[in-house]
Image (tube, rainbow, N blue to C red):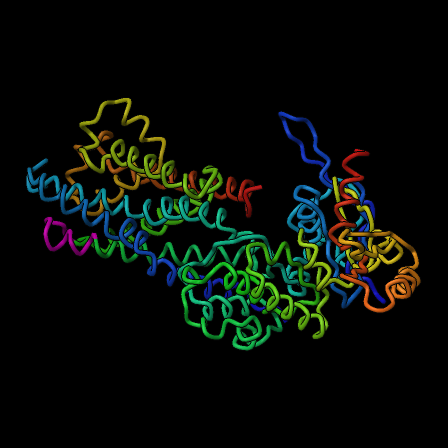
Amino acid sequence: MKPSVLRIGLLRGGLEIKQFMRQRESVVFTLLFPVMLLFIFGSVFKDNIAPGVTFSRYFVAGMIASGLVNTGFQQLAITIPMERDSGTLKRLRGTPMSPVSYFIGKAILVTVSMLVQVAMLLGFGLAFFGLHLPSTGERWFRFIWLVILGSICATVLGIAFASVPKSGRGASAIVSPIVIVLQFFSGVFFLFSSLPKWMQDFAALFPLKWLTLGMRSIFLPDNFAIKEVAHSWETGRTILVLVAWTIAGTLISIKTFKWSDR
Amino acid sequence: MQNAIKVRGLRKVYEDKKNGAKVAVDGIDLNVETGEIFAILGPNGAGKTTTVEILEGYRDRDAGEVSVLGFDPGDLKGQDRTWRNQIGIVLQSTSDAEDLTVAETVSHFAHYYSNPKDSEEVIAAVGLTDKTNARIRTLSGGQRRRLDVALGIVGGPKILFLDEPTTGFDPEARRTFWELIKTLQIEGTTILLTTHYLDEAEALANRVAVINNGRILEVATPANLGGRMNAKARVAWMANGRREEIFTDSPTKEVALLAKNFDGEIPELVVSRPSLEEIYLTMIGDQEVSA
């Protein structure tokens, strides 16, 4: 009798979380760094950007969107090449473990670290930066599907991008700048509507801009939509972009995933 | 006896944009019998690892037939998990899972197999009981290698692949390791081992294949390799303060003659056959010249 794919996937998830918690770098960079950023930016920019809306509130919404990118895309695009380098993937490939179990384990790791991240950002946002929990059932619903869709999108793109870095060591040097540049371009650190047009157009090609917009549609007042570039929350287009990237990421992952570097 | 591994006409070519194609494996035939320890011996770059990685299902081949436990590792027809359930692989150096403990890692891997061994027993078998709860990053090179073996055998494999298992070991650790491998053979595991250590092949293997430039030069027992048992024996002794030596097919006769001449003890008598290492270097060297 073969052990079930799902059960091994759950066991791998437990193991992934155990390893994550034991690596100081991963805990600091994945979980604590965004919270530190929140405190620094949130404390510096307290000006109102609209009646009753401080920049720090705008910023928390953007940081929650970034949290999905950090725990999904950034984490996997860095750790999978490291696992490829260290022989972890090759060793696993030589066992009867199904590749599906491996990805279930990764999905569990992403889910757990994402939930912790979002909870921390929400908590500090509520306590210190004038954030309000979603005020209506409709907003909660939007928040939940945005988190789920955003996480799935970030995860498959992280797996797809994991084939790009040549070595485990180089992965962080390639992936981190991409994320940081996208954060600047996508309206996390600055008001998106105040960025140059070419930056806005560039950012609109990638999921992060749409995630930040979606999060603002949940955590900012409805009338703020008028201040957005399209004068609307563009919810339909957000779904479209995220779904398109998720499909592309999945296809690329299936085609390019490598278990060893040769 | 039945063949656990059967290889016919195996060929693998690596495309290299700069240097053109390089033939890594150039028509290899192999039979590994169930229950034997079979060593593949050869210099770096001879094609050992490529051959073994094709057998392990990591690489595809360009030509030839391969059967491992009746399966074709290059075309498992959806039977990947069934096949991998019966084999154990110990790769060359790895450095994974450094933040887990020995026990966590071994018992986790045990879950992958349908009929695993008891992880505590496996840890004891590789001599890591003292390190059961140690993080992997704190292990020495030799201890890590023993953990690699533990992960290779925890599924109770019918065939164990060992790729240069004792590189970097001190002499004592190697002997302990060899004992472990012999125990596995007694328990019925077929073992395919690559090494570039002659003494390792001699201590462990029932049969040895010497491979160079992607070709098999000879398959024989370590004692018979390169016509070792029929090679001329060297008889050396001291006479009048000078080292004398002859090479002969009949060393016993020569020694008897010498004993008569010396009327008793022959000073500093040595009778020897060429070592496996000498035979091996001659084989590799001959090929290098002819190639």
Residue shown at the point (89%, 56%) measured from the top left? B230
Q: Residue at x 52, y 76 (%)?
A: B120
- From the viewer's perspective, is B243 left or right of A70? right
The range drawn in magenta is A121-132
Question: Which residue: 44% across, 40% down?
Answer: A161
Say if A14 sits above or below B41 in the image: below
Magenta segment: does it hold A123? yes
Q: Establish if A235 lies above or below A107.
A: above
Name the quadrant of the C terminus of chain B. top right
Q: Is residue B162 something one can see in this rendering?
A: yes
Q: Quadrant of the N terminus of chain B?
A: bottom right
A107 to the left or right of B161: left
Report which quarter residue B56 is drawn in. bottom right
Give whichever of B183, B189 is nearer the camera.
B183
Percent from the top left, x then y, of residue B59?
66, 46
Q: Position of residue A206 (x, y in %)?
A: 36, 34
Q: How many marks?
A: 0
The answer to whether residue A149 shows anywhere in this view is: no
Magenta-colored stretch includes residue B168: no
Main SS of residues in magenta: helix
Image coordinates for residue A59, horizontal then vertical, percent:
17, 42
Q: Quadrant of residue B31?
A: bottom right
Nearest to the observer: residue B279 or residue B270: B270
Left or right: B10, with A58 as reference point = right
Q: Nearer the viewer, residue A118 or B48?
A: B48
Q: Which residue is farthest front?
A: B240
Taking the image as shown, residue A75 lies to the left or right of residue A188, namely right
Q: Position of residue A121 (x, y in %)?
A: 21, 52
